[in-house]
Image: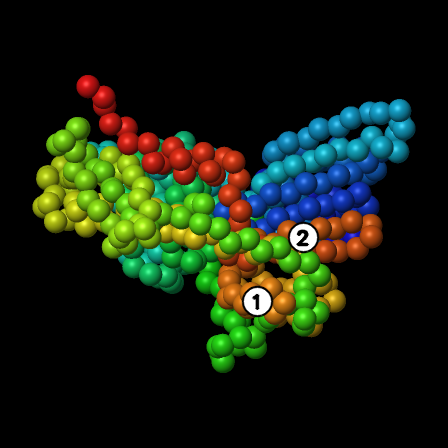
Amino acid sequence: MKSIRILTPILDLLAEIDNYESLLFTRRWHEVGEFELRINRHKRHTELLQRGNLIMLGSHRNKVGIIRHREIELDENGKKTENWLVKGITLKGVMAQRITVPPVGDSHDRASGAAETVMKHYANNHIVNPVDVKRKIDILVIASDQQRGSQISWESRFKNLAEELVEISKASGLGWDVFLDIQQKKWIFDVFEGRNLTVNQTENPPVIFSPQFESLKQLSFVESDYNYRNFGYIAGQGEGEDRRVVEVGDAEGLSRIETFIDSRDISEEDESGQALPEEQVIAKLRERGQQKLSEFTQDFFLEGQILTNSPFVYEKDYDLGDIVTIQNREWGVTRDARITEIKEIYEPGGFQIEATFGESRPTLVKKLKQELAQISGEVRK
């Protein structure tokens, strides 16, 4: 069993355990991961599994979680089944503790540049060096900016910081994380690029996950148009017939599937409060429309259980964020996709890996958020 270290938030080591019942640790490239630990209450050091403390898998500084929840039940079997269920989020979830408060004198917090630069701008403004020192988390620092990713312009107003980082991550393909520097006793925020390990590239040894190559134990595949939209009406500021609306997309006829995108939050003023030229406002609305339409693509979900004794070694030949080739010849499916989620499963019977390639299937909460995003906010008269 993988050992687990229990740490205080300031990275003092409290204890180490390796005799738990099970551990599920889920890492995500774009979004915040989570973990679930089950351990009998009567084993050593379980009293240290308190909310707010950290768990770290072995010496992996990038596999760290914050304990957020504990529960326990007692049944007729007594002590042997008196297990704690300890749940939490990966360390990057700390970003969800802040929202993007606009600077004084401006309606939005704005940033332009490489996607990495923009992500680190928001992390710096709202959690590392905020104007209000009460918002600062002293233990968190930002790694140096290497200006990776595509050029973007972003503006945010009272949005959850973690959710904004997720949106920028998905738009750019970059991943992000918070990991530990044990020597300096700091939490480090950084941005990452995955490797291209697909079959048609020549820079890296290719990785092909396929039952035929004995690298996949299980594979599930879904393709769907239920969520698909390819033409958007993007509405900015104003009311009724005076509301500014632009169109994005060129589909027509039977192939055209429309959606409404409420973008009233996009400002029509610059940082000094002066009105922007109309063409700049329209450009900003079109950019928002393209970003939102990318969330309504044709769904293609691939989830698989990777063989632990496959020809490819986890965290060496492939890792979270890498782009690999998935293939099932009998289904006629070959797809290059990024590994966006890896669930590590530790049980007495052994170690298993479950992976999500590309977008994960939307939860009910995600579906509701997408539906709410289409609400126009128009005032009926």
The amino acid sitting under disc 2 is Glu
| Residue 256 position within the rendered picture, expressed as x and y whole percent measured from the top left | 31, 50
Task: Identify the colour scheme used.
Answer: rainbow
**Snapshot quadrant of residue 49:** top right
The residue indicated by pointer 2 is 344
Above/below status of 104 relative to 190:
above
**Snapshot quadrant of residue 78:** top right
Query: Marks 1 and 2, how far apart in space?
Result: 29 Å
Assign a secondary structure to mark 1.
loop
Of residue 90 and residue 240, the one placed in the foreground of this image is: 240
- Frontmost of labels 1 and 2 is 1
- Tell me the number on the disc at residue 288: none
Q: Residue at x 19, y 40 (%)?
A: 245
- Tell me the number on the disc at residue 332: 1
Q: Residue at x 32, y 51 (%)?
A: 254
**Snapshot quadrant of residue 354:** bottom right
| Residue 61 position within the rendered picture, expressed as x and y whole percent measured from the top left | 60, 54
Of residue 327 and residue 24, the one placed in the foreground of this image is: 327
Q: Residue at x 28, y 36 (%)?
A: 262
Q: Is residue 154 visible?
A: no
Above/below status of 375 relative to 249:
above
